[in-house]
Amino acid sequence: MIPAPRGGFSPAIAFIFVTAVLDVMAMGIIIPVLPVLVEQFTGSNAAAGIYNGLFVTLWAAMQFIFSPVIGSLSDRFGRRPVILISAAGLAVDFALMALAPNLWWLAAARILGGITSSSFTTVFAYMADITEPEKRARAYGLIGAAFSAGFVAGPLIGGVLGEFGPRIPFWAAAALSSLAFLYGLFVLPESLAPEKRMAFSWRRANPFGALRLLRSHHELTGLSIVNFLLYFAHHLFSAVFVLYAAYRYGWGAMEVGILLALVGALDMVVQGILVGPAVKRWGDRKVMVFGLAAGAVGIACMGLAPTGWLFTLAMFPNALWGLAMPTIQSLMTRLVSESEQGQLQGANMSVASIAGAMSPLFFGFVYSVSVGEKPLLPLPGASFLIAAAIMSGAALLAATQRVPPRRAAGDRADFASD
């Protein structure tokens, strides 16, 4: 397979975009119904909050362990085989969840899903392979837009299919992942030339070894902490949003699916359209800080919203957090060489996975003690307010970071403020 030239290779970019849409759409389809299935197994809304948080934690723990492995494997063998194997693995994962007879089966499927979805690190490394450093914020914005496009259609489809039964959306998700695999099998070119590959090493591939890369520069360490706080705050939605929406506003699968589609549409606009012009005008650091601050305001408004309509309006300022993710990624890629891009993305995903393992348990617990007949914390939106405080802390830390100038690919840049 011919490596993609730097600066862009349209079929490759098209594939990455379509594959990201299909994979995230598949994941989005199950969002409105997975907590419902968990609640059927547990028989309690409060218990479902705990178990749903546990399943998200299992998924994130697998990402923590396997993301550096998969990132390093892609540095060694190329991006294409890793992406294809992941798509096939996700199809199997969704089929297992569709057949799950109990919580143990569902937990096993979540473990498999966490392993196979770790290849999202390879998607980011792929984009780093085929784009120049100064264009990466926009490129990662496009990936974010692809993810958002999947979340526009996924939860909406899942909400509609969920009306016919909580297991139907899982079969639809399996079909979409199968389609992504077949599409990639015939279309996806390799992006990493053989001479740029790095020998596989367990010292780098294990999660703790991969995290050493983030300690190799003070700036990488600071940005990785910002990244952690961002992921920690936003795992609130995967942990308690569906249950909270049902408890406080009486929303069912259809309403949740529609709202999540709105969230995806807003993210798609922010990351796909606004990131590039904003970075060009104000620079990565300022855009990153603004996105984090706006996200904090939006989440706080959600936790205080007394009605569903006000909660929905709060989605608009919250969507601006999408400005932060691609700018953080872009800044970090400037600090490592081309042969380390997969390792960097694996380390980033490990950081995200640590947040994903801790956050759902934390927010699931907070939610469980803030609802019910005699809650210990009589404030249903407490989880959202705490998440807003965490996001505010991320914004303050991001404002103190010095960032590298735009330099040629592979250079370890000197540092200066944007």
Image (cartoon, rainbow, N blue to C red):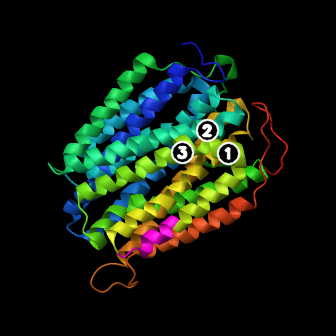
| Most foreground residue, 343 or 33 | 33
Q: Circle 3 sits on which residue?
A: 271
Identified at 14% across, 48% down, the residue is 164
Q: CA distance from mark 2 to mark 1?
A: 8 Å
Residue 299 magenta-highlighted: yes
Mark 3 residue crowding within 10 angstroms, few (<14) / some (14–19) / many (20+): many
Quarter-of-image position of residue 95: top left
Left or right side of 361 for 229 = right
> In the picture shown, does residue 404 fall above or below 119?
below
Q: Is residue 209 visible?
A: no
Q: Residue at x 69, y 40 (%)?
A: 333
Provide the residue designation for mark 1.
279
Q: Is the magenta region chiefly helix, strand or loop?
A: helix
Segment colored magenta: 298-306
Given residues 311 and 204, the one toward you in this image is 311
Residue 224 screen position, x and y as percent: 66, 53
Cβ–Cβ below 8 Å for labels 2 and 1? yes
Residue 387: image location, x then y, percent: 51, 68
Q: Secondary structure at mark 1?
A: helix
Q: Is mark 2 in CB contact (under 8 Å) with mark 3?
A: no
Q: Earlier in the sequence, mark 1 or mark 3?
A: 3
Mark 1 surroundings: few (<14), some (14-19) or many (≥20) residues within 10 A: many
The extreme left residue here reads 164
